[in-house]
Image (cartoon, helix red, strand yellow):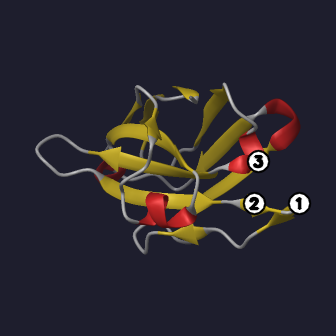
Amino acid sequence: QVQLVESGGGLVQAGGSLRLSCSASGRTFSSYAMGWFRQAPGKEREFVAAIWWSGGVTYVPYYADSVKGRFVISGDNAKNTMYLQVNSLTPEDTAVYYCAASPKISGILSGRADYWGQGTQVTVSS
């Protein structure tokens, strides 16, 4: 079992930044692929970014086209924590942001992750 807890959301003006955190417990952090998703009101949940490790190697992260160049995903294995630095925010980025974990990266990229956090709200005002 893996427990995931997000934090760091809030209200920010357009053009601002936030750093979201996802703290993992229950299993070795580096044994899983990790990802961020978001769900805006009235919309389906969508993939944002993913990162994973194998044999001590951090693989090149994936990003959705809508956030590429603005968001940065990273992880700290020693702290069992994953981060999402969100920059140059626009009102279209307003959503609940969820972190997810899966034994394989395919689980993250397909949206069928094994474990999900409860979400953290990001609201961007214009």
Q: Amino acid at mark 1?
A: Gly
Name the residue: 73% across, 40% down.
Answer: 29
Residue where numbered disc 1 is placed? 56
Q: Quadrant of the N terminus?
A: top right
**Residue type marked 3:** Ser
Residue 74 is left or right of residue 122, and the answer is right
Q: Is residue 117 left or right of residue 40?
A: right
- SS at circle 1: loop
Q: Label 2, secondary structure: give it.
A: strand
Question: Taking 48 as reference, is 27 above or below it?
Answer: above
Q: Residues within 10 Å of mark 3 (few under 14, many from 20)?
A: many
Spatial CA distance of label 2 from label 1 is 6 Å
| Badge 1: residue crowd in 10 Å (few <14, some 14–19, many ≥20) | few
Q: Residues within 10 Å of mark 2 (few under 14, many from 20)?
A: many
Question: What residue did someone put label 2 on?
Answer: 53
Q: Amino acid at mark 2?
A: Trp
Q: Is residue 7 visible?
A: no
* Disc 3: which residue: 30
Image: 115 above or below 58: above
